[in-house]
Amino acid sequence: MRSLRELSPDEQVALLFLILFGALLLVSAGAALYSLRDREGRDHATWQRFLRDLRAVWIGSVVFWLAWISGPLGATMAFGFISFLALREFITLVRTRR
């Protein structure tokens, strides 16, 4: 394998996504195997929270990958849309009235 410095920026990002999705696949496979085991000793709320967080990481990774695939314009549009949603959520949490 070539040195990381010899890779182009696009190849470096592709390697990043390969590592990210590989790790997510391993964690998802481990979670699937763990869910097949007996459920008596498991804290149900903690398990549900883990699955919810894993699903959120998958969604975030796919959105980030789609933004990268779509090029500079698509990445800018995705960043603007996500920033708008974050600002809207922030405004709902902050006291805006006296």
Image (cartoon, helix red, strand yellow):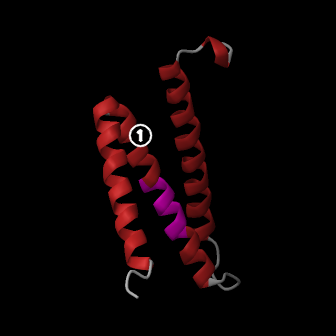
Image position of 47 with respect to 58: above or below = below
Q: Tell me the quarter of the image containing the C terminus.
A: bottom left
Helix, strand or loop for disc 1: helix
Q: Residue at (42%, 44%) from the top-left corner?
A: 64
Span shown in magenta: 51-59
**Quarter of the rendering occupied by the N terminus:** top right
Q: Residue at x 65, y 83 (%)?
A: 43
Q: Is residue 63 above or below residue 2?
A: below
Q: Is residue 1 visible to us here?
A: no
Residue 46 magenta-highlighted: no
Horizontal and vertical percent for residue 89?
A: 39, 70
Q: Position of residue 28 (x, y in %)?
A: 55, 56
**Residue 2 in view (yes/no):** yes
Residue drawn at the location 59% of the way across and 83% of the way down? 44
Give the image quarter of residue 34: bottom right
Q: Position of residue 81 (x, y in %)?
A: 31, 52
Side of 70 relative to 40 (left or right):
left
| Amino acid type assigned to the residue bearing label 1 in the image | Trp
Q: Residue at x 50, y 69 (%)?
A: 52
Taking depth in this image into account, of 75 and 49 the one nearest to the observer is: 75
Mark 1, residue position? 65
Residue 30, horizontal then vertical, whole percent: 62, 57
Residue 52 is inside the magenta segment: yes
Q: Residues within 10 Å of mark 1 (few under 14, many from 20)?
A: some
Q: Main secondary structure of the magenta part?
A: helix
> Please, is residue 78 above or below residue 34 in the view?
above
The total of numbered circles placed on residues is: 1
Residue most extreme to the bottom: 98
